[in-house]
Amino acid sequence: MYIEKPANEMKSLISVITVCFNSSATIEDTINSVEAQRYSNVEHLVIDGASTDSTMEIVGQHASIKRVISEPDGGIYDAMNKGISTAQGEIIGMLNADDLYADDDVLSRVAELFSDASIDACYADLVYVKQQDTNVIVRYWKSKEFESGLFKDGWMPAHPTFFVRKSVYERLGGFDLNYKIAADFELLFRFIEQHKIRTRYLPKVLVKMRLGGTTNKSLANIYKQNREILRVLKCNYSRFSISNFILNKAISRFTQFLTKPN
C-alpha cells in the first residue's frame, strides 16, 4: 500500500549552520537570506560563542531558527563541529554570520544536485561584497571542476558554498582543531583530494561574503592562513613547490578582481 507523505517529508532536510560571536551588525541579514529560501525543508542552526552584544536577542526574534547553542567555545571550527554533531539534516552547509545567500533559490539548486544519490558534495561560486552594501561586488571567486593535484597549486572551493552529506562527516571526521585559521582548507583537502569524495561543481554564485571576515581582515591573518595551508600540503606531498603555490594563488587572487559574474 502506498501512503503519500507530506511534501516536506519527501525532500531531503538541509541543515544550514551559522557560527557567530558578537555578530549583531550582520547576522539578521544572514538569517533573512535563509528564511527567504523557496526550498522549504531547512533546519537553520546558530552556534554562538557566548556573545556579549545583542546577537542572541536578534536570533531569538526568529522562530525559523530550529536549534541554538550559546556557550564559550574553542573558536570558529570548534563551533562548526558542534553544529555538525547537532545537525539532523542529510545535507549540511555552513553560512557565516556576515555572509548571505545570493538569491532565494540557492537551497533548491543544492537539493536538486543531491537528488543524484551518487553525489557526496557540491560547491559553487562566491562573490565578495562591501560591508555596508552587499549589492556591490568587489571580487568574484569562480571555481571549477576538481582535478587531482589542484590543491597543491593553490586552488580550493569556496567553503561557504560547500554542501556535503552528513554521512561524509560521520565517515571522515569534522574540522581538525590543530588548524586555527585554515581548518576549512584541511577539511576540503582531506575530503576531496585524499578521500576522493564525489563532488559536483555548480557554476553559479550561491553566496555573498562580506569583506573583512576572520581570514581576510588583516595581512597577519592571511599570512597565518597560508602558513597553515602550506603545512597541510607539505605533510601530504613529498615533492611540493612553494613558489608554484604562491604564484598560482597570486594569479587566482588577481583575476578575482578583474572578472565579474555573468
Image: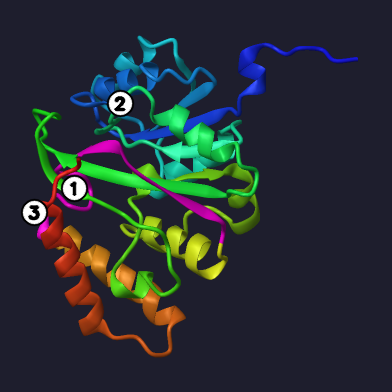
Q: Secondary structure at mark 1?
A: strand
Q: Are marks 1 and 2 in contact (CB under 8 Å)?
A: no
Task: Judge whether residue 76 can be spotted in this image.
Answer: no
Residue indicated by mark 1: 140
Q: Which mark is residue 258?
A: 3
Determine the image quadrant of residue 184: bottom left
Amino acid type at circle 3 is Leu
Front-lying residue, 249 or 84: 249
Image coordinates for residue 56, horizontal then vertical, percent? 33, 20
Front-lying residue, 46 or 143: 143
Amino acid type at circle 1 is Tyr
Q: Are marks 3 and 1 in contact (CB under 8 Å)?
A: no
Image coordinates for residue 102, horizontal then vertical, percent? 28, 30
Image coordinates for residue 199, horizontal then vertical, percent? 51, 54
Is 218 contained in the magenta span?
A: yes
Badge 1 crowding class, 10 Å Cα cut-off, few under 14, some 14 to 19, many 20 or more, is many
| Residue span colored magenta | 197-219
Q: CA distance from mark 3 to mark 1?
A: 8 Å
Badge 2 crowding class, 10 Å Cα cut-off, few under 14, some 14 to 19, many 20 or more, is some
Is 250 contained in the magenta span?
A: no
Residue indicated by mark 2: 103
Q: Are marks 3 and 2 in contact (CB under 8 Å)?
A: no
Please tell me which of labels 3 and 2 falls first in the chain.
2
Please tell me which of labels 1 and 2 falls first in the chain.
2
| Placement of the N terminus among the 4 image quadrants | top right
Please tell me which of labels 3 and 1 falls first in the chain.
1
Determine the image quadrant of residue 189: bottom left
Q: Secondary structure at mark 2?
A: loop
Residue under the image location 21 percent in, 42 percent down: 127
Task: Judge whether residue 58 can be spotted in this image.
Answer: yes
Image coordinates for residue 167, horizontal then vertical, percent? 64, 46
- Is residue 261 depicted above or below 13 in this figure? below
